Each structure stands twice: as structure tokens, then as C-alpha cells.
Image (cartoon, coloured by chain):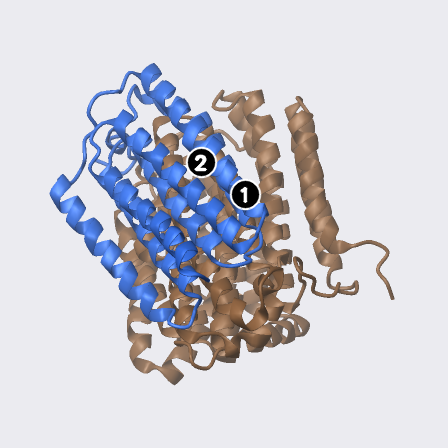
Amino acid sequence: MTAPFDAVAAILLIPVGAAALLAALPNYKMSAGLNVAASFLTLLAALSLFVTDRPQPGQYLLVDDLNIVFIVLNTFVGFTTSVFSASYIAHELETGRLTAPNLRFYHAMYQIMMFGMNLAFVSNNIGLMWVAVELATLTTVLMVGIYRTHEALEAAWKYFILGSVGIALALFGTILVYMAAQPVVGEGTNAMVWTVLIEQAALFDPALLNVAFVFLLLGYGTKVGLAPLHAWLPDAHAEGPTPISAVLSGLLLNVALYAVLRFKMLLAASPEAIAPGPLMVAMGLTSLIFAAFMLYRRRDIKRLFAYSSIEHMGIIVFAFGMGGPLANFAGLLHMVMHSLTKSAIFFAVGHIAQVKGTQKIADIRGLTETHPGLGWALVVGVVAIAGLPPLGIFMSEFLVVSSTFARQPLLAIPLVFGLLIAFGALLLRLTGVAFGEPRGSTAPVEASYVPMYSHLALVAGAGIYLPAPLVTWFQHVATILG
Amino acid sequence: MNGLTFDIAHLLAGGLVLVSFMMLYQDRLFALINVFALHAIVLALSVAWQAYVQEAHHLYVTAAIALIFKAIVIPVGLHRIIQRLGIHRDIETAVGIGSTMLAGIGLVALSMVLMLRVTPEADPLAREDLAFALSIILLGLLVMVTRRNAVSQVVGFMSLENGLVLAATGAKGMPLVVEISVAFSILIAFIVIGVFLFRIRERFDSVDVGALDDYRGERR
């Protein structure tokens, strides 16, 4: 059976076409609608990857069991965020924080960012993947700075400088991988094609691969927000528009993580190279514990959840670093659950910040009384992200912890310690925000809660029951990851 | 490869490291930009020589980009911006020149030890190029961390990127080199000059990144 249309091409071309259209459309209502429609079509195209025949891996593009998971998650959260964004920006326009030309730019950038992220996922070429990650980063830099306030500019500048350094290190790593592959595979494009590299990785010079991986881990790790290199992340989350915080946490971190995973597989295929696991475990644990402590001193609600993202990326990198079918399964599940939960939380935070007119935690009090629909959604989201049962994150964290106890009990101690510290911090903040004496504006929120509720419903559902086909799929991917 | 071609390539790459060192102790913005222009010229020569040695004609494009864009357009543009902003005074270095130079020497030694050790079997030219390239990248990072001025941080980043181009051209037959150098040029031109500097000027009346720190949301 040949597919009547090319799903991969659709995933890439719909955002590009939409971006061109959005750049030309002056009417913001129409462009918000178009943004939603384009994101929805991209999601449909991504879903069709499950049913249509997959194209043969070419020199540039690849679809396999691993990246389908990432693409579908990416396009799904991209779609729901575009729905949230439509109501969010309408409010920003009313309050005058954004102008109509800003919005035209914003929508076009949103689609270019989706294109960059999708391209990074489907690329089979490590050079192309680098270009795509860079493109996605640049567009988010521009969007973080869109408010043009002091804070927003500082955040964008910091993000730009650290992101560029990260991307430069990643490119150096990519060049080193090419140098390692070139004597075996031969000159030219083939020595950058991932499927070719992984087949012959055993023959590569292990010393060169080791150095390359260190550069790649540092470079892409900057984007993942791993601990010593995370400085850009809280600022960028706090000062940009909230839909961008949601896609940064929910999606862009995953893109960088995906790149790290691809190279980890490459290293694992070379028997003489260093094991990539311990490096990732160390960075993951550092991020987790560091971020857990940082959670206590936050006064800004978006920064609070940005640190929580660092914490969770730490857990995910830790799980993938441990490796093995069970830990990889847990890492994958945790990644999906974190994306869904964190973006739902940012949707809630966006509504809250708009209605209260502030992001200061001290000024947001008693939400469950003034805005029950919003307040309780935030409660569910924070309870989920803190890892309480029966929600999805509890299950994945439980799997990470139990698999660590079984294999490296000593490592489990700092892991559990970090989880508990973070748990305490989140619940401490939540009690005031959700149940304290009501403070600030009590005006109703004029926006749709559907994106937020649908994410939370998925997370809650996954905590209670995971469909068998999904489990089989994840188990299969977990074994590929090695 | 015969001795002379190797020596010339070696000379040019080594010269690039030397110019990176020159950047470390420039304490005036105009001088820093002039040194950067020199950096870009040496890079262009080096890339052109690689193109000639490897008979890879597409690399001439990269060399031309380095020459026209980085050695002429960007420095002239930066000169204008500096004049318009009226910041052609001394630039503060966050760390003293002596310790910066020592740190630079340490970084170069580190990259030599690292790269020469892990690539004993690689083509000698590519191997030396990689070691030099890593030195330039680390020196570029050093420029970025020792400066507090946004313009000089951008210059540091561009010299870092020159190191990457050197590494990419040294790796024989590497695809996408031209595309990557174009992408980098667009990145620099579009983002840095077009957007940030003007906005920073507009909002802060200063391009000192230190001033930005005062606006941090968490500072109390």
C-alpha cells in the first residue's frame, strides 16, 4: 500500500506554509484561528504516521518507532498550546502589552518554531538536526523578548548567549562525530546520516567518540536545562509570554533531550567507547537536587515552575542514563507525563497571572475560592507534578525509583531525597496559592479551560490505566534505546 | 600531502589562535572590532587554502562569506552602532589582563593535550586544525566571560564561531559546511545587530550587560 500523501512532508510543510500566511495576515483574530488550524492539521499528519507506510530512511529524513512518540507529543502539545494562546493573546492585546504587529510576528514565529522542532525529530542527518534545533531555539529567543521590557530583554539576551554557546559546543561535537565516522564510512553526506552511523559505530575511533559525546552532552544539555548550564531557563520561562513558557517546558526541552538520546545510542553501539550512562546520571541527579532546593526561594510563580522543569528534566535524564528496558520505559513515560502536566500548569498560570495582574506568589492567594475551576485545576496539576498518586507522574517516578533501587540502591538515596525536597517545596507554595485568604482581583476568567482540562484528564487517566498498545509501544522503544 | 601545503595551513590556523589572543587584551571597543576583522581575514585565508588543498570548491564560498561578511560588513556595522550609541570609551574587563592571558594559555594547552591525544590516527592536518579550532572556541568563550559589554560579548561569540568554521573546513569532505556558515552569518546579523543592540539601547541607555543584572526579577 502506498500512502496517498506524504505524512512527513505534511508535518514539515504545513507549519512553513502557515508561517508564510501568518506573516502576511494583518488581522490577529484570523491569524490566531489559522494558527490553531495549522497546528491541528500538523497533529493529524503526525497521527497518520501510525497508519501510513513509513518512508525508507533517506539521507536527510527518518521515521522510526522512537521519533514517532516525540513527534506526536510535540504536535499535540503544539496544538493545545495554540488554542490556549488564542485566548491568552486576546487578553494581552486588550491590556496593551502586545500590539497587532507584535502578534503577526508572534504567530509566524510560533509556526516556524513548530517546523524547527518537527524537523529536528524527523532528521536522519546529525548536521540537519543541529540546524533544526538551532532554528527552534532562535525563534523562541525572539518570542521570549517580545514584551520588550527590561526583564524580557535580559532574559532573551541571556538565553541567546547561553543558547548560542550551547549550540556551538554541540556543533563541535557534531564535527567530531563526523571525523570519527569519516575513515570508516567515507567522505560526504553519508558520514552524517544517523542510520548509517549507528550501523557502523562499532568501528569508529572510541576516543574521538568519547570527546564528541562530552561536547554534545554539554551543548544539547544546555538546552535541556541540565544543572550547571541551566541559567537561561528560569528567566526565559518567567519573562516570555506564557504560551511560550508552556512550549519551552513541554516541547523544546524534549527536542534537546531527543538529540542527546540519539547520540547516546550511537555511543552505546560502540563497545570500546565510555558508557554514556554515568555522565547522564551525574548530570541528572545534580539538576534534580539543585532545582529541588532552588524551589524554596522562588517568589515568582512562573520561575517556580521553571525550576520544577529543571528538576523533572533531571529525573528524565537520570532515568535514561540508568538505561535498561525498565528505566528507559520510565524515562519515556515521565517525559510524556511531564510535558502534558507542565504545559497544563503553565496554561493555568497564564490565566492566573492575567486575572490577578501579577506573577508574584505572595499576591496570589485563595484561588480555589475566587476561581474554583482554575484553582482546582492548578491543585491537580501541582499534585501531579509533585508526584502524588494516582496521577501519571507518580507512576513514572515510582518506576524510576524502584528500578534504581533494584540495580543501584546507593543512587536511589539521593534520587528519593531530591524528590522529597521538591515535593515539600511545591506543596508549601501550593497551599498559599490555592487555599489562603483570597487576595487580588476576583474577576472571572474569559478563556477556555479546555486545553488545560484535557491535559490533566490525560495525565490522570494515564495514572489509573495505560492502554496496552501504548505500553507495548513504549516497551519496544525502551529496548531500542538500550 | 607535501610539506609546504601543510606548513601554510598550519601557519594560518596558528595565526588564528594568535589573533584570538590579541582579542583578550584589547580594552577599547574599536580596537577589539579591528582585531576581530583581522581574525576574519585570517580565517578567510585559511578556509581558502583548505579549499585549494582539498580541491573542494564549495569552500571558496565559505571563505568569501568570511571575508566579505565578517571582515567587512560586520565590523563596519559595529563601528557605526558604537558611534551611534556613543560608547566608544574604554571597555571594562571583568578580570585583569594578566590573569586572562594566563587562563588563555591554559585553555590552549588543554585543547592541545585533549585533541592531539584522542586523534592519533586522524589525518595530521585535520588533527592540528581540530586542536587549533578548540583553542579558538575556548578563547572565544573566555572573551565572552571576561567582558561585560554586550558588543564585546558578540565579538567573542563571533570569534568562537570562526573556530567552528575552521574545524568544519578541516574535517575533509564534511557536508553542509557552507550551509552552516551561512546559517551562522544570518544568526549573527539578524538577531544580534538587528534586534538586540537597538532594543537594549532603547531600553537601557547602556549596552553594559552588568546593567541588565539590576533588572532581574529575583533580586531583592
Decide which of B46, A1 is in the foreground and name it: B46
Chain in brown in the render = A
Instruction: Look at label 2 and name its amino acid.
Output: Gly
Q: Residues within 10 Å of mark 1 (few under 14, many from 20)?
A: many
**Kind of residue sitting beneath label 1:** Tyr
State which chain disc 1 sits on.
Answer: B
- How far across and down, in percent of the image, does residue B60 sit? 54, 43
Chain identifier of the blue chain: B
**Which residue reaches farthest bottom?**
A406
- Separation of disc 2 and disc 1 at Cα? 41 Å
Point out which mark residue B60 bears: 1
The answer to whether residue A374 is visible is no
Q: Residue at (48%, 76%) from the top-left corner?
A: A268
Image position, residue A217 (x, y; %): 41, 61
| Residue placed most toward the observer, A221 or A341 | A221
Q: Nearer the viewer, residue A150 or B24?
A: B24
Residue A168 at what x, y percent from top left? 42, 49
Which quadrant is home to the C terminus of chain B? Answer: top left
Between A320 and A384, the one nearer to me in the picture: A320
Residue shown at the point (30%, 51%) measured from the top left:
B138
The quadrant where residue A383 appears: bottom left
Looking at the image, which residue is at 31% across and 76% down?
A: A411
Residue A197, x across and y down, in percent? 57, 70
How many tags in the picture? Answer: 2
Q: Secondary structure at mark 2?
A: loop
Query: Which chain does the residue under circle 2 lie in?
Result: A
Q: Which mark is residue A240?
A: 2
Can I make out residue B153 in this image?
A: yes
* Residue A362 against residue A295 in the figure, above or below: above
